[in-house]
Image (tube, rainbow, N blue to C red):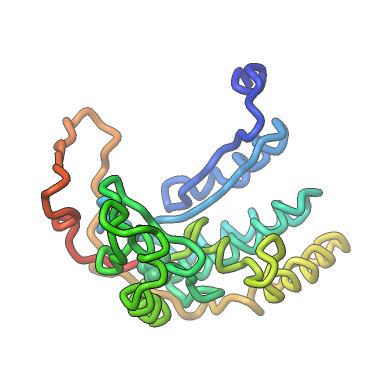
Amino acid sequence: MRLKEAGGTDLGFGSVIQDDNIDQIVDLYRFAQERDVEYATSTLHNAFQFHKNDNVMYDRVRVAKEVEKLIAEMLRSNSIKNWFRAYLNLGLIENILGHDRLIPCTAATDFAFIDPWCDVYACNVRPDLWMGNLRKQSWEEIMDSPKADEIRAKVRTCTQNCWMVTTARTAMRNPRAPQLPKARPFWWVVANKLRVSLGMPIPFDKYIDYATFVKDESAVKREFHLDDKPAKRIVQNADDEHYTFVGPYFNR
Ligand code: SF4
């Protein structure tokens, strides 16, 4: 509230949905609504940029089912933004269960990631999708190069299955008119906004195959960092080889 009083306009809360906070997301969404600020969600991912390779969900079905409640709440609101966030959360359910993305990824075409050393990657998840360096090449040289075409081909067959705000929102946009959604999210929102307005339930079982989900019996418990243990600092210079310490990971 102090930020609002200070003149802040684009304010909101964000949650990385996981086992530990799933029981709080609907309450936090209502809290944000009551204060007229945004509420955005994502879920656990592993990525070289996050320096994480042990992010896995422990009880995927329980977490996914709770996200349904948030989707229904968002569709009940009067905000078009929240209606499409509801679809984005439908994609989070698929991601949490380890299913394929709702819409294919458009990394290296609709977005790219630039690291502090000016290296350009298709995304912030796979360090092997390196496209060029802005200290040595212009943006156009990188984006129009045969290397970029090679990377885009790898994106088309990528099995990492991320569904983060950047990778999901760009995939939901209409390529001809990026301010508008693609037909699939548009008609899903129309149909389910109508259902919710008429007091009907959203038929999640029609959209989500809850019988099939990834089981991580061998998943290692995530390392906890919110305690007093001193964190190990990793300092890298421009000429060092980067991102070699992350180890293998998968987002499914
Ligand atoms: S799905 Fe693949 S290409 Fe797309 S953001 Fe994830 S790792 Fe990158």
Decide if residue 153 is on the left or right side of residue 219: right
Specify whether residue 60 is in view: yes
49 in relation to 199, above or below: above
Decide if residue 187 is on the left or right side of residue 233: right
Q: How many marks?
A: 0
Residue 40 location, x and y as percent?
57, 47
Residue 160 location, x and y as percent?
36, 71
Which residue is pictured at 48% across the width and 64% down the height?
Answer: 163
Residue 136 location, x and y as percent?
26, 56
Closer to the camera, 240 or 183?
240
Figure quadrant of the N terminus: top right
When asked about the image quadrant of residue 153, the answer is bottom left
Specify whether residue 46 is in view: no
109 in relation to 157, above or below: above
Decide if residue 189 is on the left or right side of residue 108: right
Closer to the camera, 41 or 198?
41
Which residue is pictured at 66% across the width and 59% down the height?
Answer: 86
Which residue is pictured at 50% across the width and 57% down the height?
Answer: 166
Closer to the camera, 115 or 171?
115
For this orientation, the residue located farthest to the right is: 198
Residue 117 location, x and y as percent?
25, 48
Ligand 1's quadrant: bottom left
When asked about the image quadrant of residue 213, the answer is bottom left
Figure quadrant of the C terminus: bottom left
Which residue is pictured at 45% across the width and 55% down the height?
Answer: 43
